[in-house]
Image (tube, rainbow, N blue to C red):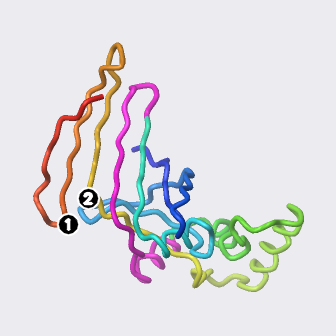
Amino acid sequence: MANAMTLATADADGRPSARIVLLKDFDSSGFVFYTNCDSPKGQELTINPFASLNFYWKSSQRQVRIEGPIGRVSDQEADEYFATRPRGSQLGAWASRQSQPLASRQSLIDEVDRFDKEYGNSSVPRPPFWSGFRLMPLFVEFWQAGEFRLHDRFGFSRSAEGDAWATTRMYP
């Protein structure tokens, strides 16, 4: 299963930002990824709770694009996922002030060591600033490259979760 996806968000002024995140779960209610909620992406998703995901497979010349509203996962869901992460990743979540200026790599390593000592042999709890987001799809596009740029594109859209999907063949 592919799990690297581009997440596109926009800030309060409509300025877009895109980055690769990892898909950690999906079901009929949406696509889930996790992050530091104080990061730029976490702040953008809180201010403007709508986003787009894109999966691209160069070798098969296909992509899937998904758009929809965003919401946080429950604390229970975030706790359960956090508990499955390697201890080093759990400590890294505590130590990282994601996307903030970093004086040196050593200062990050020192922070990880500090949290390692703080939690000792006990389990590492999920930081309160770290959680998951779920994108609930309202639009999904399947794209396959075609000769002479005559691509095949199919869009599936709905107004709300639970509504029937409308299907449209789209021009390339």
Give percent across and percent down for residue 80: 45, 76
SS type, badge 1: loop
SS type, badge 2: loop
Image: 71 above or below 140: below
Does residue 161 appear to the left or right of 78 in the view shown?
left
Q: Residue at x 39, y 80 (%)?
A: 74
Q: Nearer the viewer, residue 66 or 106?
A: 66
Q: Nearer the viewer, residue 91 or 34?
A: 34
Q: Residues within 10 Å of mark 1 (few under 14, many from 20)?
A: few
Give percent across and percent down for residue 27: 28, 61
Image: 6 above or below 31: above
Q: Nearer the viewer, residue 75 or 52?
A: 52
Is there a contact, CB below 8 Å, between mark 2 and mark 1? yes
Query: Which label is found at residue 121?
Result: none
The residue that label 1 is drawn on is 160
**Quadrant in which the N terminus appears:** top left
Q: Residue at x 56, y 73 (%)?
A: 43
Q: Residue at x 10, y 58 (%)?
A: 164
Question: As shown in the figure, which amino acid type bears the numbered disc 1?
Answer: Ala
Q: Residue at x 54, y 66 (%)?
A: 13
The residue that label 2 is drawn on is 138
Question: As shown in the figure, which amino acid type bears the numbered disc 2?
Answer: Leu
Query: What is the magenta range?
Result: 57-83
Give percent across and percent down for residue 139: 27, 53
